[in-house]
């Protein structure tokens, strides 16, 4: 599946699966892919709908033609439908993508003209649009159709019913996420984690005693020139910050830092519900580790407005030479976010007594196959770079 043009066989059966929600007639039906699910995109006289046909991955999406703000082409066989409520829906693998785009635009234009002729000056901007796609367990489309059968033929009433059901599902997800965070916090609290500035000072002191200064210098020199497959892309390089290594650690990185990363996350990234551990020995006597759990605004076109994320940090200090920080970030609840892991490495090098340079490397580690890998790589790297540039500017503002 994932390919094909208009569907002539089984057209009535496919259209009938949406009930009355598409309008009085179905203009055309096209096979395509949405979030790795094969299915059909149906263009009706009042609405468009997508229903997947993958067993165990059933998914149904329906929204009014008048709620479409634009239809954009992507690559050679994909398209993106933007709604007036700010959502984007990407459909791909059309054999006749250009014809589908034309059909959608014509249907949207016709629906808008009919809408205005009926006495409304403009589409309802406040129409409740639903985020019906997620990487969390899907709700079978059977339930959506049963919900639709229980109401009148009014499309607005159908949407309201679906909205109520979706709201309940989202609330259940929030409860589940909260329970998971509580369990994670309980687990973290059971670890032997020492905090405070004194712990870090004692830890770095033990590192210096266990390794000769020349050994540490050589390790740092090798670290800078060796290529690491986890971080193939250089995002930022050569940025100078007016701090010594000691001052920078105590000001921004330490357990008792005056300007901890949490402050940046709240002020600039608008993160919420941040929970973190203190720096602790990971067990090798050279590496500190800590974990952040939080909710970040979701820039993706689909999914919840706030995405649950987890970043695991490790920190290694090479005496006065520099510091290496490695970050592994996973995101939950956003379509395709379970396909990859974000890897970052930050090198802070002491160049003069009162200045350090910052270098940020990045890598995306794909753990599942996805047809959107190229798109994810482009959009994710741009977002990651912006985050670190914002962080550097924020550091400068704290000076």
Image (cartoon, rainbow, N blue to C red):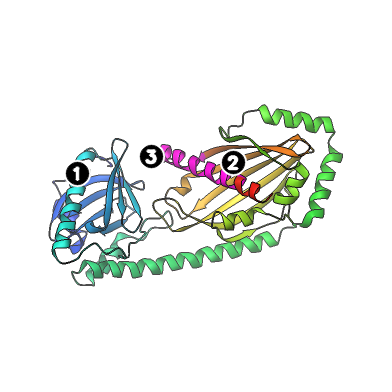
Q: How far is mark 3 from mark 1, CA to CA?
A: 24 Å
Looking at the rendered image, the disc whose residue lies closer to the viewer, 3 or 1, is 1
Q: Position of residue 391 (x, y in %)?
A: 60, 47
Residue at position x 17%, y 62% in the image: 115
The span from disc 1 to disc 2 (Cα, nearest Å) is 42 Å
Q: Is residue 328 above or below residue 233?
A: below
Task: Point out the frontmost of discs 1 and 2.
Answer: 1
Question: Which quarter of the rendering shows the N terminus?
Answer: top left
- First along the sequence among labels 1 and 2: 1
Secondary structure that dominates the magenta span: helix
**Secondary structure at numbered mark 2:** strand
First to last magenta residue range: 365-392
Whether the magenta-drawn stretch holds residue 107 is answered as no
Answer with left or right where residue 328 lies relative to residue 220: left
Q: Which residue is mark 3?
A: 371
Dot 1 and dot 2 residues touching (CB under 8 Å): no
Vertical placement of residue 178 versus 292, above or below: below
Q: In terms of image quadrants, where is residue 344?
A: top right
Residue for badge 1: 102
Answer above or below: position of 158 versus 397. Answer: below
Marks 2 and 3 in Cβ contact (< 8 Å): no
Callout 1 environment at 10 Å: few (<14), some (14 to 19), or many (20+)?
few
Question: Label 2 belongs to which residue?
Answer: 344
Image coordinates for residue 304, horizontal then vertical, percent: 43, 58
Looking at the image, which is closer to me, 363 or 323? 323
């Amino acid at each position: 599946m994932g390919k094909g043009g208009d569907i002539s066989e089984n057209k009535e059966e496919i259209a009938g699966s949406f009930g009355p929600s598409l309008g009085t007639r179905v203009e055309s039906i096209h096979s395509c892919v949405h979030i790795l699910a094969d299915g059909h995109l149906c263009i009706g006289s009042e609405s468009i709908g997508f229903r997947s046909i993958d067993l165990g991955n059933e998914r149904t999406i329906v929204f009014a033609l008048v709620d479409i703000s634009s239809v954009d082409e992507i690559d050679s066989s994909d398209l993106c439908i933007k709604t007036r409520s700010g959502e984007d829906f990407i459909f791909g693998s059309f054999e006749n993508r250009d014809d589908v785009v034309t059909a959608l635009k014509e249907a949207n234009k016709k629906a808008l003209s009919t809408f205005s002729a009926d006495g409304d000056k403009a589409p309802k901007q406040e129409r409740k649009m639903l985020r019906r796609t997620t990487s969390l367990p899907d709700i079978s489309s059977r339930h959506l159709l049963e919900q639709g059968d229980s109401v009148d033929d009014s499309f607005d009433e159908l949407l309201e019913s679906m909205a109520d059901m979706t709201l309940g599902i989202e609330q259940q997800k929030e409860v589940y996420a909260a329970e998971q965070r509580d369990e994670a916090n309980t687990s973290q609290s059971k670890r032997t984690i020492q905090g405070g500035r004194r712990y870090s000072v004692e830890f770095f002191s033990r590192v210096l005693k266990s390794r000769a200064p020349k050994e540490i210098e050589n390790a740092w020199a090798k670290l800078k020139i060796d290529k690491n497959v986890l971080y193939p892309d250089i995002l930022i390089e050569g940025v100078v910050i007016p701090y010594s290594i000691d001052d920078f650690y105590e000001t921004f990185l330490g357990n008792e830092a005056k300007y901890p990363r949490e402050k940046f996350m709240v002020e600039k990234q608008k993160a919420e519900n941040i929970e973190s551990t203190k720096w602790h020995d990971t067990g090798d006597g050279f590496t500190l580790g800590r974990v952040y759990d939080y909710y970040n605004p979701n820039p993706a076109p689909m999914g919840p407005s706030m995405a649950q994320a987890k970043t695991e940090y490790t920190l290694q200090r090479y005496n006065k030479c520099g510091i290496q920080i490695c970050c592994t970030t996973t995101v939950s609840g956003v379509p395709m976010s379970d396909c990859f892991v974000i890897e970052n490495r930050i090198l802070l090098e002491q160049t003069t007594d009162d200045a350090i340079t910052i270098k940020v490397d990045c890598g995306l580690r794909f753990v599942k196959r996805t047809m959107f890998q190229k798109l994810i790589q482009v959009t994710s790297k741009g977002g990651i770079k912006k985050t670190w540039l914002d962080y550097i500017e924020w550091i400068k503002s704290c000076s």
